[in-house]
Each structure stands twice: as C-alpha cells, then as structure tokens.
Amino acid sequence: MVIKRKLILPNDAEFKASLEKKLKEYKKRVKMLKKSKKFSNPDMAYSTIAGYKALIAQRLAWRGEVDTQRFGEELKEEYGFIDFIAFNTAAAVIDDYCRTGGKNVIKAEELPRELDPLRKDSPARRSR
C-alpha cells in the first residue's frame, strides 16, 4: 500500500536547482541499472528505489507537487505493478529533501531515520 503524502516543491530557487541536480543523479543511477542487465525489461529499473526517486522528483519538478497515492496508482496502471516498499522509501526520501534538505537521509538508498524500524533512534522502532 502506498503511504499517502503530499510532496510540495519549496518556492526556493536554490532548492529547485538542488532538486534538478538530484534528478540528474537519480536518472544516472537508473541508466546504470538498465545497463547492468539485472532486468529482462530495462524499464523495470524504474521499479527500484532510485527509479521511483527519479520518477517522483521529475513529477515534483514539473508540477510543483506530488500526491504519492495518486501517482502510485498511475504508475501501477502504466507498469502493471508497483513495489510498495521501494516506492514509499523513495517518496519518504524526496519528502525529507523537501522538508529538511535531506538531513534525515542517512545514505542514498536508506530510509529516513523516522521510517527505519531497524535504527535504535527511530520512532518507527518504538511503535513495533
């Protein structure tokens, strides 16, 4: 299930430039995944965390906001499925970049602290 979030692009030229830079980085990762031949269909590279981050960041840059639940439904309709864990992770990372500039993102492919139940300092761990 896709976690409902409304991602809003901050009205800040510096942030928008930073998002464009991140988008290029995510697209580069997807391109590398496509070349790695891990997928029988190269478009399946978009079903990874990096792929979903690229798609979400691109939508955010184009429209200024993303309703993750609606966007997840669109992707499921287009591709026939959606990896909910990868999509929710990607959305949480982009949301954190919008809110804090990425202060809670530990590594490029990890969950933000507050969503990672394996981290001792995570609120998600306390709710288990």
Image (tube, rainbow, N blue to C red):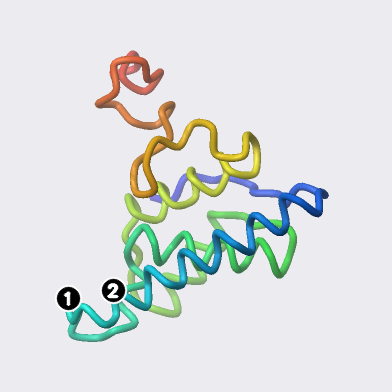
Spatial separation of the CA atoms under disc 2 and disc 1: 7 Å
| Image-quadrant location for residue 95 | top right
* Residue at x-position 81% and y-position 54%: 13
Q: Position of residue 55 (x, y in %)?
A: 51, 68
Q: Position of residue 58 (x, y in %)?
A: 60, 68
Callout 2–callout 1 Cβ contact below 8 Å? yes
Give, as a three-letter code, the residue at label 2: Leu
The kind of secondary structure element at disc 1 is: loop
Give, as a three-letter code, the residue at label 1: Lys
77 versus 60 height, above or below: below
| Image-quadrant location for residue 37 | bottom left
Horizontal side, residue 92 vs residue 61: left or right: left
Q: Position of residue 17 (x, y in %)?
A: 71, 59
* Residue at x-position 46% and y-position 72%: 27
Of 66 and 102, nearer the camera is 102
The kind of secondary structure element at disc 2 is: helix
Residue extending farthest to the bottom is 41
112 versus 76 height, above or below: above
Q: Residues within 10 Å of mark 2 (few under 14, many from 20)?
A: many
Q: Badge 2 is on which residue?
A: 33
Q: Quadrant of the C terminus?
A: top left
Of 48 and 16, nearer the camera is 16
17 versus 126 height, above or below: below
Sequence-wise, the earlier of marks 2 and 1 is: 2
**Residue 127 numbered tag:** none
| Image-quadrant location for residue 59 | bottom right
**Residue 38 numbered tag:** 1
* Residue at x-position 48% and y-position 43%: 92
Q: Residues within 10 Å of mark 1 (few under 14, many from 20)?
A: few
* Residue at x-position 45% and y-position 37%: 105
55 versus 10 height, above or below: below
Horizontal side, residue 45 vs residue 27: left or right: left
